[in-house]
Image (spheres, helix red, strand yellow):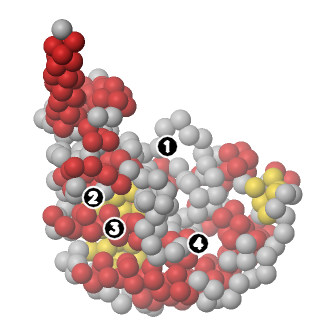
Amino acid sequence: MAKKFIRNFLIGSGILLTLCILLVVAFDPFFQYHKPLPGLKAVLTDKEYQCVGSLKNFDYDSVIAGSSVSENYNNRWFDEAFGCTSIKAIRSYGATADLCYLLDIAFKDHTLKYVFYNLDPSALSADPVTTFESTGCPMYLYDDNYLNDIEYLLNKDVIFEKIPYLIAQSLMGDYDEGNSYNWSQWKQFNSDMILGLYIRKLSIEEMKDDTYYEEQLSGNLSILCAEIDAHPETTFKISVPPYSMLWWDNVYRNGDTESYLYNLEKAMDKLLTYDNVELYYFLNDREVVTNLENYMDILHFSPEINRYMCDSIIEDSHRVTADNYKDIINDSRNFAYEVVNELIKPYEDRIKVDIYE
């Protein structure tokens, strides 16, 4: 009797586990095995879990690559303007090595018309190494080894949360596939938010040498330029985003103003040598970056600014060229010091100071 019970239990458990695996494979909310089933939408809300799978399995010919400030683009803005079908390759930190890792996945089985690449200034001074594993990403989803997918295939959260969410958003929700990974809903963008979140250093560090991040800069440019070199058929439309003027204040107080400007100038100088690169720059757009009503914190701006950037790229404004890039850097330098010497003064009584640094 006991043996029969154990046998039936094992058979039943095996059937249940098999059904769970088949359910996950069929609906595949992380898109590890296939694109969405007919009638279901590409509901992309978990970039760490879905970005790699969607890059492997979706149909597209262009990529929007960048950090969290790129998440609030609507893919359709680019699709309609440039006659392409785009998908996002997002990494919150925007590290060069991470983004190029994702681009390698995209290029493996796709020929890309465009890469709309967001170049964060901090990405030029970061270590030129991938950060997925060190930040706890689910690496079993990042490789091509199906044997370790058991953590995905028998995951109760996937079965009881992710699959029902995918179905609900596809059939009953108003999910816009163009807004993949968009995080702006229910967020506030105004001066109270940004000033409330900015904790200003009490001290001002000594200004670093221009070449302080030379090693990191060289490594990151090598990675990015290798990507550009390898794909001359692809147009890389690279943009430097409009962080708020409080970012300039923070950079100054950390002693990074001159080193960051040096990095940007050297990056421009290198990137402009490529025929398949177009470069756009928004860090010195005074109308945007001095208006704190556009921001949630010192980095993150509203989707309206994403639209503005996209329109600028479409209209070929804010374009950096071999003839104007040094002027742009000089203008940015003047603006950066204008921020710390004048423009921030009216807000100082509303800025919190880190007295425990």
Q: Residue at x 26, y 46 (%)?
A: 149
Which residue matches tag 3? 101
User: What is the three-letter code of the residue carrying label 4?
Assistant: Asn
Which residue matches tag 1? 184
Mark 2 or 3: in front is: 2
Horizontal side, residue 273 vs residue 62: left or right: right
Which residue matches tag 4? 284
Q: Quadrant of the C terminus?
A: bottom right
Q: Residue at x 27, y 42 (%)?
A: 150
Mark 1 or 3: in front is: 3
> Distance from label 4 to label 1 (Cα)?
24 Å
> Distance from label 4 to label 2 (Cα)?
40 Å
Under circle 2, the secondary element is loop
Answer with mark 4 or mark 1, whichever residue precedes in sequence: 1
Horizontal side, residue 38 vs residue 157: left or right: left
Image coordinates for residue 276, horizontal then vertical, percent: 28, 81
